[in-house]
Image (cartoon, rainbow, N blue to C red):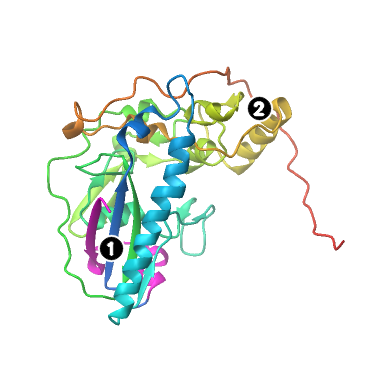
Amino acid sequence: MDLVGIAPIERYQHAPPRVHPAAHLPGARTVISLAIRYPDALFVHAGCGLAESIFGIERYQNLVIGRRLQAATLRLTRLLEDHGHATIPMPVSGKWRVHAYKDIPTDWCADFSHRHAAVAAGLGEFGLHALVITPQFGMRQRFVSIITAAPLDPDPLYAGPPLCDHCLRCVKDCPVQAFDARRSALESVTIGERTFLYAKVDHWRCAWSEQLNLIPEEGPACAGQTYGVLPPATGPVDEMVMLNTFYAKCHAAGLQAAMTHAMGNCMRVCIPPRLRGTQQALTHLCPKTTKRHTEPIPATPAPRPYHLVAS
């Protein structure tokens, strides 16, 4: 592991009850946050250059870094259990509740937040984009968490120089306009004795690229997707807008290599002040090999329900 931090459960006193560590493990006392950094050049050059390949970062993120993170959480879980402490290793990528659920009022809510766990464990702080920036690696690491009943000594919250200076690169380079960075729209979260402010994120717009891969230049172009569709410039985006767009795209271009790696521009363009001049900045993102189709998407009927039929 490149980064390890420990947070006491008291830092989660403002967390929503259903995503609180104790909601996963009754009697939880500590959350451990771990991280592995990305190879710097791999992060910078994915999708760029003559190869136009995102295969490296796609495979390493999920099959190498992701698996090593989970292997580490399993080993630590066994160690803590052997010493008599109930422990749950959280998966490296959790599940979202796409719609509001019971006492969770928000859409696209993760069942557990590794980014909040990393901040609570002192590994970094939130940037304007609501993601975690660390002093060592900026945006270029992946996190995982362990919830345990073990009473471990906590690490302090990050208290160094600000890691985000609101340069607005993340906002300006977001092709789906997912961020509302107006001062009146900023959201706040309190962790321990610190309160963090970050932009309001429209997770439906973010999912336009991240989950539906409708923006080829964020990665899918490098896997052969040649037809891209931008979301409406204004107004709400919801599941029907996304479904109609997805089916219209498939009707126009066929089912292309849709489920591939989408690299959020907010991650790739963000270099915190203390790492500028050390981390290499991007000269460009994925090659713009497609026409950006911005005309209105025709309404298409919702897909018909299907039924499993015994053979």
Closer-to-camera residue (245/227): 227
Name the residue located 30 percent from the left edge and 57 percent from the top edge.
117
Label 1 sits on a secondary structure element that is strand
State how far apart marks 1 and 2 are (Cα).
Answer: 46 Å
Q: Is residue 116 visible?
A: yes
Residue 189 relative to residue 260: left or right: left
Rendered location of residue 239, percent (x, y): 60, 43
Residue 138 relative to residue 243: left or right: left
Q: Is residue 244 magenta?
A: no
Name the residue located 50 percent from the left edge and 31 percent from the top edge.
219
Label 2 sits on a secondary structure element that is loop
Q: Which mark is residue 46?
A: none
Q: Which mark is residue 32?
A: 1
Q: Is residue 24 magenta?
A: yes
Q: How many marks?
A: 2
- The magenta stretch is 1-25
Residues packed near mark 1 inside 10 Å, few (<14), some (14 to 19) or many (20 plus): many
Name the residue located 34 percent from the left edge and 67 percent from the top edge.
75
Q: Amino acid at mark 2?
A: Ile
In the picture as drawn, the residue positioned furthest to the left comes out as: 160
Residues packed near mark 2 inside 10 Å, few (<14), some (14 to 19) or many (20 plus): some
Q: Amino acid at mark 1?
A: Ile
